Image (cartoon, rainbow, N blue to C red):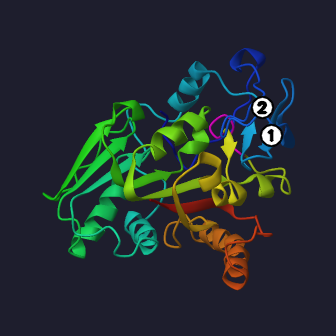
Amino acid sequence: MVQTTRFHRGKRLGHADLDDAREICPVCHSSRPRRPVLRVQRNPDIEMLECDACGAASASHMPKPEILESYYAEYYSDACTRHTLDDPERFARHVLRAVPDRLGSTPLRILDFGGGDGSLAVAIAKNLHSRGMSPQITIDLVDYCEPRDPQDSGISIRAHEDLESLEGSYGLILASAIFEHIPDAHTAIRQVIARAGEGAYMYVRTPFVLPLARIISLIDITYPGHVHDMGSVFWGNIIETFGIKGTILSSRPSLVETTFTRAPIRTLLAHALKAPAHLEQALLGRNRSPRWNLVGGWEAVVRFE
């Protein structure tokens, strides 16, 4: 498990810092040849390789576990990132719009994978309570952070350091800005979807920066913090790639992380980049491969059968 933050910077690695290259895609395990789409660094050469089978792009060489541990230690000491968005309440409204009134009035279990202190899951739980839904909500938070106090007797939150310690199934799964950090993304995705109960929903969000980075060389993709880039093609095909029995309710440019109050210029630029993609989907529908991919991030909502 790793923690996430909005302010990572890339770091140059040496030969001794890297695991040997693998032929298979670390996201879908396809053995089909992958094509280089972006050079991360030279000597040793590291490239982002795009998989023709699933559409994800991954680093040709993964950092060794101890290198990743050292990398994140530069960002975290005893402190812990709370979440990766400026406004948890806005995030909650955004997610629940994709599953309007479908979570019912029965007790709900939420899996929050890589969610910092659980603020985003707590915001969703409180939103549901305000609408008279799911009177008892349990949140299982998989991260190294100390979970926040929900300050609501109807919401309980438990901390876990890994997915292996979880038991049972969940009605709502959050995996916001986490899969891109995990070298063995295939196993992590499999473990997460295995926890989905019948009729469950999963919200996922990942960076999709390679289209921008290929145009603007100054863009830092933050390797080794980010070792995968998962965009419109990958999330649009997630059902087929992982054999999920379910439906994609939405696959679209991700919610802008920042707000005009806290970061006006960055927020304006993010909205401007995402606007053409939203317009394209509105006019042409979601069932076609988008042409405008300069969006910076992608998200999807899946309903399991």
Res. 162 visible in picture = no
State the image coordinates of residue 173 (x, y, percent, origin top left): 41, 53
Mark 2 crowdedness (10 Å alpha carbons): few <14, some 14-19, many ≥20: many
Q: Which residue is mark 2?
A: 60
First-in-chain label (1 vs 2): 1
> How far separated are the C-alphas under marks 1 and 2?
6 Å
Compared with residue 109, is residue 270 higher up or lower down, i.e. above or below? below
Residue 55 painted magenta: no
Amino acid bearing label 1: Leu
**Horizontal and vertical percent for residue 67?**
61, 22
| Mark 1: few/some/many CA within 10 Å (<14, 14-19, 20+) | many
Percent across and percent down for residue 239 are 59, 55
Q: Which mark is residue 200?
A: none
Which residue lies at the image location 44% right of the left edge and 75% below the top edge?
97
Q: Residue at x 54, y 32 (%)?
A: 72
Residue bearing mark 1? 49
User: Quarter-wise, where is residue 289 in the image?
Assistant: bottom right
Q: Nearer the viewer, residue 195 or 19?
A: 195
- In the image as oriented, which residue stretches furthest toward the left? 153
- Residue range of the region highlighted in magenta in the rendering: 221-226
